[in-house]
């Protein structure tokens, strides 16, 4: 009787039966998952390392005829303070990396240099509060920061920002000028000013100006926006309003 030969085991090589497209999708998904995981770790570490320090400086400006304040990426808050004294309070928030912050003065110009990598340090940045002497002409210039001014009772206020919003409320100044390339200008006056000027390239302008004895010569122009003005305009006005935008609405109203 013949013995039956033992079957020979056949080895089949492993191979991926998925289509190239499926393999690509899985590879991309895996990479994205890895990136998300790393980003989550970085965010968590940054939040744990988050730290805010506050620095206050007092500057005697009794000899100054005007004051110019230059910022970079800082957000600026302007309020009225004491005569002849400028008080600068800076809140500097850092994360995994320290936020840059430098403050210097040359003559009538105060300069802040600041910056941080927000993708690596969520919530980082610099917020500065300026307590300015009443009546001192003030010019504010920033690059990427927002500017807001509250209850400035007198003098001349000029604000310029490259990419930031400009907000002013309860103003009693004689003249307020605001310009921004990409941002919104919002102004609310507690008293009639002599002049209000606003210019934006990409942003709306909204102003509330009280009625009173002063008449205004009003000029508005928007290349691609709606214009609405409740102000009476006369060429013989003893005050003037000039508002120009490229792509934004203009709204001038009375309380």
Image: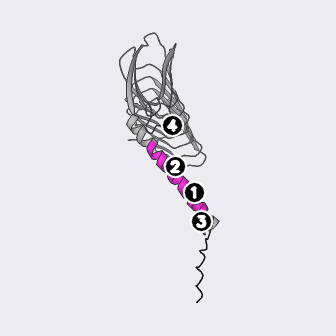
Q: Which residue is mark 2?
A: 35
Q: Residues within 10 Å of mark 4 (few under 14, many from 20)?
A: many
Q: Residues within 10 Å of mark 1 (few under 14, many from 20)?
A: few
Report which quarter residue 1 is drawn in: bottom right
Measured in 3D between alpha carbons, the distance from the residue under mark 2 to the one under mark 3, in whole angstroms, is: 20 Å
Measured in 3D between alpha carbons, the distance from the residue under mark 3 to the one under mark 4, in whole angstroms, is: 45 Å
Q: Which residue is mark 1?
A: 28
| Residues rendered magenta in the picture | 22-41
Q: Compare marks 1 and 2 and give the one earlier in the sequence.
A: 1
Q: Residues within 10 Å of mark 2 (few under 14, many from 20)?
A: few
Q: Position of residue 91 (x, y in %)?
A: 40, 28
Q: Position of residue 103 (x, y in %)?
A: 48, 20
Element class at badge 2? helix
Depth check: give the residue in front, 39 or 144: 39
Measured in 3D between alpha carbons, the distance from the residue under mark 4 to the one under mark 2, in whole angstroms, is: 31 Å
Q: Residues within 10 Å of mark 3 (few under 14, many from 20)?
A: few
Q: Which residue is mark 4?
A: 164
Label 1–label 4 contact, CB within 8 A: no
Depth check: give the residue in front, 162 or 38: 38
Asked whether residue 116 is drawn in magenta, I would say no
């Amino acid at each position: 009787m013949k013995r039956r030969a033992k079957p020979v085991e056949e080895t089949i090589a492993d191979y991926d039966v998925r289509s190239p497209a499926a393999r690509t999708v899985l590879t991309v998904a895996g990479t994205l998952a890895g990136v998300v995981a790393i980003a989550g770790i970085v965010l968590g570490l940054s939040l744990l390392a988050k730290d805010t320090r506050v620095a206050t400086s007092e500057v005697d400006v009794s000899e100054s005829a005007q004051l110019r304040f230059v910022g970079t990426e800082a957000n600026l808050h302007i309020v009225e303070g004491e005569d002849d004294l400028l008080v600068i309070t800076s809140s500097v928030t850092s994360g995994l990396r320290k936020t840059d912050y430098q403050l210097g003065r040359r003559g009538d110009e105060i300069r802040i240099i600041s910056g941080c990598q927000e993708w690596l340090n969520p919530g980082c940045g610099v917020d500065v509060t300026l307590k300015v002497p009443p009546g001192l002409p003030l010019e504010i210039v920033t690059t990427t920061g927002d500017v807001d001014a509250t209850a400035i009772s007198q003098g001349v206020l000029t604000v310029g920002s490259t990419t930031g919003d400009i907000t002013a409320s309860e103003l009693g100044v004689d003249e307020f000028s605001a310009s921004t390339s990409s941002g919104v200008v919002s102004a609310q006056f507690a008293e009639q000013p002599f002049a209000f000027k606003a210019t934006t390239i990409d942003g709306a302008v909204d102003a509330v100006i009280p009625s009173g004895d002063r008449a205004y010569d009003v000029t508005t122009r928007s290349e691609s926006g709606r214009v609405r003005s409740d102000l009476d305009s006369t060429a013989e006005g003893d005050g003037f309003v000039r508002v120009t935008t490229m792509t934004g609405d203009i709204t001038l109203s009375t309380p």
